[in-house]
Amino acid sequence: MLGDGIEHVQTTPSGEIWVGYFDEGIGGNFGWGGPRGPEPIGASGLVRFSAGLERVWTFPEDPPYGGISDCYALNVAGEDAWACYYMDFPVVRVSGDEVTAWENTVEDARALVVADGRATVVGVHPALTGARVTGRGAELHVVAGTEWLKAGGL
């Protein structure tokens, strides 16, 4: 079980599963959290699971740029995960168990495009409201209705 309130799911070449959660998956809902429920599986906002669905890593409680309230963007490139999250929208890279973070000036980031250790933060233009925008490695995917646009490379 990967939990509730899932916003993003991506896998690595080795079969690990990265999951980014939105607020209900972090704070709890549907019996998770609160005085009577178990801690939500996604309480940290970003979790790595083994190929056998065991939780093997969670985002640290004291990361360089505060905790995750809502994981707005997730990109898995190779074995590394990159994320951008609410409140201050820092860009973080998780390589192994090590987190590196950078400040970011793009508010409401919706996707990250990653190549050669660099990341580009993608916001959403008002014309794309309602579209699903996702980064996967060096590719940006936009799905709007029945249309799918794929743009590649940094």
Image: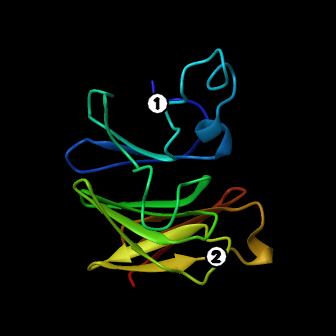
Name the spot of residue 34 as percent of width and height, x first: 67, 24
**Residue located farthest toward the top when viewing the structure as drawn:** 36
Residue indicated by mark 1: 2
Q: Nearer the viewer, residue 145 or 84?
A: 84
- What amino acid type should be assigned to the residue bearing mark 1? Leu
Q: Secondary structure at mark 2?
A: loop
Residue indicated by mark 2: 123
Is 80 positioned to the left or the right of 110 in the image?
left
Q: Residue at x 68, y 56 (%)?
A: 146
Packing grade of label 2 (10 A; few <14, some 14-19, many >=20) is some
Q: Quadrant of the N terminus?
A: top left
Q: Secondary structure at mark 1?
A: loop
Packing grade of label 1 (10 A; few <14, some 14-19, many >=20) is many
Name the spot of residue 56 as percent of width and height, x first: 28, 37
Q: Nearer the viewer, residue 140 or 25?
A: 25
The tag on residue 143 is none
Distance between the alpha carbons at the discs numbered 1 and 2: 27 Å
Does 60 sit above or below residue 141? Answer: above
Whether the residues at callouts 1 and 2 have beta carbons within 8 Å, the answer is no
Q: Quadrant of the C terminus?
A: bottom left
Identify the mark nearer the N-term, 1 or 2: 1
Q: Residue at x 49, y 44 (%)?
A: 44
Q: Quadrant of the rendered structure where residue 92 is?
A: bottom left
Q: Residue at x 50, y 80 (%)?
A: 103
Is 73 positioned to the left or the right of 22 in the image?
left
Is 73 positioned to the left or the right of 29 in the image?
left
- What amino acid type should be assigned to the residue bearing mark 2? Gly
Q: Nearer the viewer, residue 71 or 146?
A: 71
Name the spot of residue 6 as percent of width and height, x first: 57, 40
Tell me the colour scheme of the image. rainbow
Q: Quadrant of the rendered structure where residue 127 is?
A: bottom right
